[in-house]
């Protein structure tokens, strides 16, 4: 049995961050990284943006070049899925029948695209968009596709819609909620994205529940809605979120419901087992529940660093300031903080224009800022989120956001 001092499961953003941070800390132990995908770690955000558009090639998505992985002496075990963990024996078993031992295990397995679980989902032309292979498969059919239906009005679905419109494809977005991006933003921003997508010719249908996918000769022909109507489609993208990949970890006894709970150092509670990235829920005092699970590059990269430091013996509390971005059409959207548990949402600038921001407040404390084509407020948000502000000056959009801060940061992770 091959044994590693540190074994990382998952070669996405979090797994790569743990690996290269261990290297930069000068860690001398033997490190292995097992990943289900055949590719070296690569950037996922461009999959629904520049890569789908054809602006960049797959090679340019690499988080680190092949030379880095060979120089760092990290053993890359690609195309293998970890199926079980024996926490007592400190070992994992893979789909290929291999067993690897570990001193410390880092679970950074992200998740897989959620499925609708309706009839017809396995027809040709029905796809998801989580991996490079998914994006390549989608790219390959763009030239021959006239009508695309996207199920899900979240960031991935809307980014894909904007790219497809650029190719002149007819796009229908089906969203089961009453507004777009409901899970991640407030109504003003949802309304803005709805207006822009409609203006760009996207047929957006809200409160639209999919009950089945229709096909002929094994290929998709349309999507059936709860009201019995059918939306014709040559291809369908199911973009309805992520299912965290935590099965083996929970089976081994780690805590968590649908994801894995970690503490502020990334520890799962199983001896010497850490986790980072999309699959974790971590202490986050500003959230009403006191914990958060975040799907973002910022979270995967920074939590990965915290885990590497904990393994290296320099524990640091993970106290993130979450941030996220999305590009659609000519819109540059940036969010800082999490727009949950707020009592007020104040718009700075003109929400009917293409440049404004929304500040989410609990009392006079800023919990989050959404900036739509508004770099100045995005930069100011990095200072304002988590702090008290002068509400009168905040309402004056001529005042820089960073200049209206009056109090110290509220709340710290424990
Ligand atoms: C299309 C798209 C666009 C996005 N755009 C943005 C954006 O603009 N901004 C932003 O901040 N975030 C964006 N995200 C989210 C961001 O990519 C994720 O938050 C980030 O990739 C999470 O990193 P991770 O390492 O936790 O998981 P992942 O990147 O998903 O990596 C997990 C890896 O683990 C592997 N794995 C899973 N199970 C096992 C197993 N049992 N054994 C071995 N390997 C396993 C997987 O195959 C995968 O390679 C986007 C995501 C997608 C899909």
Image: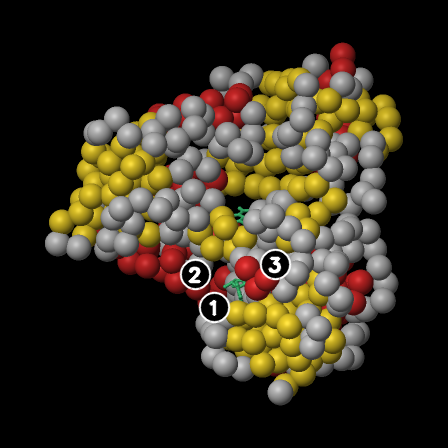
Picture coordinates of residue 225 (x, y %)? 27, 32
Say if residue 377 shows up in the picture: no
Say if residue 154 shows up in the picture: yes
Element at label 2: helix
Between marks 1 and 2 in the image, the one whose residue lies nearer the viewer: 1
- State yes or no: Cβ of the residue under disc 3 lies below 8 Å from any atom of ligand 1: no
Residue at the location (50% across, 81% down)?
97
Residue at the location (56% across, 34% down)?
184
Evaluate if marks 1 and 3 touch, with contact meaning CB atoms under 8 Å apart.
no
The image's colouring method is secondary structure
**Image side of residue 74 versus residue 220, left or right:** right
Between marks 2 and 3 in the image, the one whose residue lies nearer the viewer: 3
Mark 2, residue position: 132
Mark 3, residue position: 250
Q: Which of disc 2 and disc 1 is earlier in sequence?
A: 1
- How far apart are labels 2 and 3 at the CA level? 27 Å
Evaluate if marks 1 and 2 touch, with contact meaning CB atoms under 8 Å apart.
yes
Picture coordinates of residue 139 (x, y %)? 32, 55
Asked if residue 24 is positioned above or below residue 329 in the image, the reply reads below
Mark 1, residue position: 37
- State yes or no: Cβ of the residue under disc 1 lies below 8 Å from any atom of ligand 1: yes
């Amino acid at each position: 049995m091959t044994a590693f001092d540190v074994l990382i499961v998952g070669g996405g953003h979090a797994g790569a961050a743990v690996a290269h941070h261990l290297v930069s800390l000068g860690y001398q132990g033997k490190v292995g990284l097992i990943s289900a995908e055949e590719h070296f770690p690569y950037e996922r955000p461009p999959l629904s943006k520049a890569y789908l558009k054809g602006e960049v090639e797959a090679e340019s998505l690499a988080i680190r070049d092949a030379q880095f992985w060979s120089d760092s002496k990290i053993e890359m075990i690609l195309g293998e899925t970890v199926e079980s963990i024996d926490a007592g024996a400190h070992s994992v078993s893979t789909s290929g029948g291999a067993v690897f031992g570990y001193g410390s295990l880092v679970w950074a397995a992200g998740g897989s695209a959620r499925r609708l679980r309706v009839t017809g989902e396995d027809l040709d032309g029905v796809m998801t968009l989580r991996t490079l292979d998914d994006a390549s498969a989608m790219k390959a059919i763009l030239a021959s596709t006239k009508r695309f239906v996207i199920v899900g009005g979240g960031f991935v679905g809307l980014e894909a819609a904007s790219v497809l419109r650029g190719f002149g494809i007819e796009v229908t977005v089906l969203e089961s909620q009453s507004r777009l991006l409901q899970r991640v933003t407030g109504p003003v921003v949802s309304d803005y994205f709805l207006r822009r997508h409609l203006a760009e010719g996207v047929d957006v249908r809200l409160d639209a529940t999919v009950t089945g996918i229709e096909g002929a000769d094994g290929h998709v022909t349309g999507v059936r809605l709860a009201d019995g109507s059918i939306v014709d489609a040559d291809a369908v993208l199911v973009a309805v979120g992520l299912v965290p990949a935590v099965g083996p970890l929970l089976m081994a006894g780690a805590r968590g419901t649908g994801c894995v709970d970690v503490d502020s150092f990334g520890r799962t509670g199983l001896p010497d087992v850490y986790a980072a990235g999309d699959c974790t829920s971590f202490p986050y005092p500003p959230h009403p529940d006191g914990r958060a699970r975040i799907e973002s590059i910022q979270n995967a990269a920074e939590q990965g660093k915290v885990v590497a430091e904990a393994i290296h013996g320099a524990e640091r509390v993970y106290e993130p300031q979450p941030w996220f971005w999305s590009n659609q059409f000519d819109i540059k959207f940036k969010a800082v903080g999490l727009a949950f548990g707020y009592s007020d949402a104040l718009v700075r600038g003109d929400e009917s224009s293409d440049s404004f921001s929304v500040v989410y407040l609990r009392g006079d404390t800023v919990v989050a800022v959404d900036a739509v084509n508004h770099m100045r407020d995005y930069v100011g948000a990095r200072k304002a989120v988590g702090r008290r502000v002068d509400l009168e000056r905040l309402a004056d959009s001529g005042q820089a956001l960073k200049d209206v801060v009056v109090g110290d940061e509220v709340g710290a992770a424990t």
